[in-house]
């Protein structure tokens, strides 16, 4: 059964509203360590996807979408029609129990190639110390 169908059958009031801590400590950490994420509502996307195409890819019916994106070490976030630009220094994501820094949240704005700012906003979550298995040189970020 597709997750979208499963989500649509949940009782009223059941929604996916994870905290920043949950996004980093559970979803992103498990994704990077290749652990199974039960009933995973997130899909992988190419960061070069146009922002207006993202709602069609999302598993959840929502105005806010959650995705994993492969991180190859480069910060190039360009698409055919524009680019994502990081705004500010970002903020630390803290473990809710220990208050230790477990990651970082950065805000990005989408600009068209002509430099015109659009209304598209993305939050990128990064693990503080990704534990990637030795057999893999891949790493993922989480995007909302």
Image (cartoon, grey):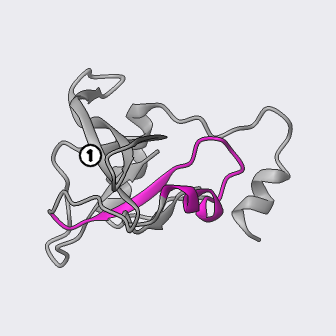
Task: Look at the picture and state if 81 lies above or below 128.
Answer: below
Q: What range of the chain is rendered magenta?
A: 51-73
Name the one closer to the observer, 97 or 61.
Answer: 61
Task: Look at the picture and state if 126 lies above or below 104.
Answer: below
Q: Is residue 71 one of those drawn in magenta?
A: yes
Q: Residue at x 28, y 58 (%)?
A: 77
Q: Is residue 86 one of those drawn in magenta?
A: no
The residue tagged 1 is 126
Q: Residues within 10 Å of mark 1 (few under 14, many from 20)?
A: many
Residue 127 is situated, as x and y percent measured from the top left of the image, at: 24, 46
Q: Residue at x 65, y 41 (%)?
A: 63
Name the one closer to the observer, 61 or 37.
Answer: 61
Name the one closer to the observer, 81 or 105.
Answer: 81
| Residue 144 horizontal side relative to residue 138, left or right | right
Residue 53 is situated, as x and y percent measured from the top left of the image, at: 57, 62
Which part of the image, by quadrant, shows the N terminus?
bottom right
Q: Residue at x 76, y 52 (%)?
A: 7
Residue 97 is situated, as x and y percent measured from the top left of the image, at: 34, 22
Task: Look at the picture and state if 129 lies above or below 22.
Answer: below
Rendering quarter of residue 15: top right
| Residue 121 horizontal side relative to residue 130, left or right | right
Name the one closer to the observer, 45 or 35.
Answer: 45
Query: Of helix, strand and loop, which one carries label 1?
Result: strand
Q: Residue at x 56, y 48 (%)?
A: 65
């Amino acid at each position: 059964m597709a997750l979208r169908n499963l989500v649509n059958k949940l009782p009223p009031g059941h929604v996916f509203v994870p905290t920043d801590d949950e996004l980093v400590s559970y979803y992103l950490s498990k994704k990077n360590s290749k652990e199974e994420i039960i009933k995973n509502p997130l899909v992988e996307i190419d960061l070069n996807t146009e922002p207006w195409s993202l709602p069609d890819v999302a598993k959840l019916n929502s105005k806010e979408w959650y995705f994993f994106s492969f991180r190859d070490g480069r910060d190039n976030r360009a698409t055919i029609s524009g680019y994502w630009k990081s705004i500010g220094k970002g903020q630390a994501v803290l473990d809710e129990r220990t208050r230790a820094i477990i990651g970082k949240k950065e805000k990005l704005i989408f600009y068209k190639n002509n430099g015109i700012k659009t209304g598209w906003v993305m939050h990128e979550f990064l693990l503080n110390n990704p534990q990637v298995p030795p057999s893999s040189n891949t790493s993922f970020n989480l995007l909302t």
